[in-house]
Image (cartoon, grey):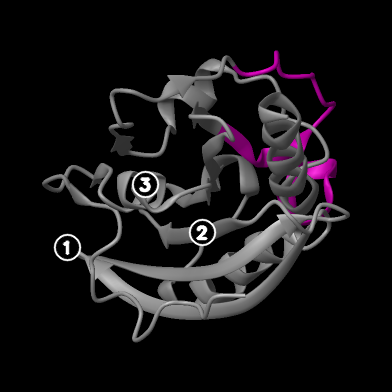
Amino acid sequence: MGRSVILVLLAACCAALAAQQPARTAADQDAAIDFQSTLPPDWTVIAPRPPQATPSAQLSPKGTACIHVAQTARHGDPASVIVIVELPFACFGQTMEAGDLPGFGSGAADGLKQVFDLTNPVVGTYALGSHSFWIERAKGNPKGQAGVQYTMEIACSVLKKGAVCWMAMAADEASLRAFEQMPVALDGEAATPLVPSISFSKPPAAN
């Protein structure tokens, strides 16, 4: 069950954001987005699938081929999962501004609806240093598995060199707290917990 749930979450994220991941070049590394995330120490990092080459990111509609799954980790049984995805502007061919953040974040969140039934979504905004964040939290279960309930949470921001989303599928409150308290450092600023406690005016109602 745990492995299949991870694949479901990854499929949901990637279906919304990328048909395939391009091979990274030296230029990609030079233009790497400046952020660091410190995963909870008791979570297991999942090795990424080897990227598949694509002829040119510019040929991909809306730059979806530029999306890269930066990190994936799991914990517990049933598995809670954290996925971090990034969109480098050097590959995308254009930059984003703070005003583009709600559309980018909601687009990423919509991808989850392809394989999850989501209820009671709550949207919020907050700031970490000079960076604005868009966040959504909802209750969810894989389609056809109504008895398996998770808290789904996605937080996105626009950085100097790209946009990033942190996604969680939390099977319990401890996993959700671990995700929200995960230290992140953006564009060289001091590390802070990913999600402040005041990000939502109210939690999603229980099903």
Question: Disc 3 versus disc 1: distance between alpha carbons?
Answer: 19 Å
Which label sits in the foreground, 3 or 2? Answer: 3
Question: Disc 3 versus disc 2: distance between alpha carbons?
Answer: 10 Å
Question: Where's residue 75, x and y in %?
Answer: 47, 29
Which label sits in the foreground, 1 or 2? Answer: 2
Q: Which image quarter: residue 60?
A: top right
Identify the amino acid type marked 2.
Ile
Dot 2 crowding, Cα within 10 Å, few <14, some 14–19, many 20+: many
Q: Is residue 159 left or right of residue 85?
A: left
Task: Check contact, mark 3 vs mark 1: CB within 8 A.
Answer: no
Which label sits in the foreground, 3 or 1? Answer: 3
Q: Which image quarter: residue 6?
A: top right
Q: Is residue 44 above or below residue 205?
A: above
Q: Secondary structure at mark 2?
A: strand
Task: Check contact, mark 3 vs mark 2: CB within 8 A.
Answer: no
1 or 2: tag closer to the N-terminus? 1
Q: Which mark is residue 129?
A: 1
Write the residue at 53% across / 43% down. 86
Write the residue at 25% across / 46% down. 187
Q: Which mark is residue 179?
A: 3
Identify the amino acid type marked 1.
Gly
| Residue topped by disc 2 | 154
Q: Secondary structure at mark 3?
A: helix
Dot 3 crowding, Cα within 10 Å, few <14, some 14–19, many 20+: many
Question: Where's residue 200, x and y in %?
Answer: 35, 79
Write the residue at 62% across / 75% down. 207
Q: Is residue 102 above or below residue 147?
A: below
Question: Where's residue 76, x and y in %?
Answer: 49, 29
Identify the amino acid type marked 3.
Phe
Q: Look at the image and say whether residue 52 sits in the magenta stretch.
A: yes
Q: Which residues are magenta?
A: 48-69
Question: Disc 1 versus disc 2: distance between alpha carbons?
Answer: 19 Å
